[in-house]
Amino acid sequence: MYLNKNATSAKSEYSRHSIEIVNSKSRTDICRWLILLISLSTWTKLTDSKEMRVVCYYTNWSVYRPGQAKFSPQNINPYLCTHLVYAFGGFTKENTLKPFDKYQDIEKGGYAKFTGLKTYNKNLKTLIAIGGWNEGSSRFSPMVANAERRKELVKNAVKFLRQNHFDGLDLDWEYPTFRDGGKSRDRDNYAQLVKELREEFERESEKTGRQRLLLTMAVPAGIEYINKGYDVPKLTKYLDWMNILSYDYHSAFEPAVNHHAPLFALEEDNEYNYDTELNIVSTYY
C-alpha cells in the first residue's frame, strides 16, 4: 500500500524488517504519519519542472510527544513522500548551520535516522529546513544584510549538508521585513542570499561531480507578506521549488469558523478574506 509503484522489492524488504510502520501497529502508525502530513501540509509551487513531488516535513520535537503521539524518524514510511524535510535547524553568530536540538539531532541520531531512510527508498531525497517561527527575523535580517556573513554561511552550508548526508536546504524565514528585527531591505537581501547559495551549490557539484544540492524555500500564503518580503521573479530563478505554507488561512482569532486551508474562498467570504485561498495565492506566485 505504498505510493511508489516502482519500489516493489524495496517495499518487501522494508516489510520483512518490520520497521515500526509495517509491524502489528501499521494502521496506527500510518494514521499518525498521515495526520502529521495534514497538519504540516504545504502546497508545492514548481519552478523548473513538471515532475510530481510530494514534499513532507518532519518536526524534530515530535519525539517528545507523550504516548502514542510520539513520532520519530523510524515511524516515517519512506515511500509516502518524494522529498522529506527535517524541521528545523538554525545558524550561529559564526554563520554556520547548527542543530536546534543537538541531543536529539546528533547525539540520539536524529539526522542519521532521517537520512538513513534513503537506504529503503533509493529515490527519496532528504533536506533540512533552517528557520521556523521561533527563529523569526532577529537572526536572519542582520545575517543577510552583511555580504561577508552571507559568504561564510553559504560555504559552511555546503559543508554541513554534506557531512550530515542531506540532499538540500530548505529556507524558512518567517518572515522577511516582518516581526522583531525585520528591515525594509530584507526582501532584496534574502533574494541575494538565495542567488549566492544556488551559485555555490552549482560550483560544488561541478567541482566534485556529486549531484547538486537542492535549494527550496517555505513561503507565506498571505499577499501582504509576499509583496513586502519576497522578490518572487528573482527567487524563482534560483530555487528548485517553493513550498507555500498553505495552512492557517483562518484561525481561532476570527469570530467565525472557517476551513484553515481552503482551495477556494466561500461565497460569503468578505473583503478581508478575498486572498485567503490556495487558488489565488498559488497563481500569485
Image: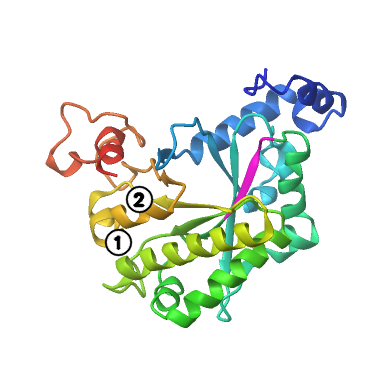
Judging by the rendered image, the residue that carries numbered circle 2 is: 220
Going 43% across and 39% down the picture, which residue do you hit?
44
Identify the amino acid type marked 1.
Gly
Q: Nearer the viewer, residue 237 or 87?
A: 237
Q: Nearer the viewer, residue 13 or 23?
A: 13
User: Magenta part mainly helix, strand or loop?
Assistant: strand
Q: Quadrant of residue 27?
A: top right
Q: Which residues are magenta?
A: 123-128
Judging by the rendered image, the residue that carries numbered circle 1 is: 229
Please give left or right for residue 103 compared with residue 281 in the image: right
Q: How is the image coloured?
A: rainbow
The N terminus, quarter of image: top right
Going 54% across and 73% down the picture, which residue do you hit?
153
The relative height of residue 106 versus residue 55 in the rendered view (above or below) is below
Going 71% across and 65% down the picture, which residue do you hit?
102
Q: Position of residue 241 (x, y in %)?
A: 44, 45
Identify the amino acid type marked 2.
Pro
Q: Is residue 24 magenta?
A: no
Which residue occupies the extreme left position in the image? Answer: 271
Q: Which SS class for mark 1?
A: helix
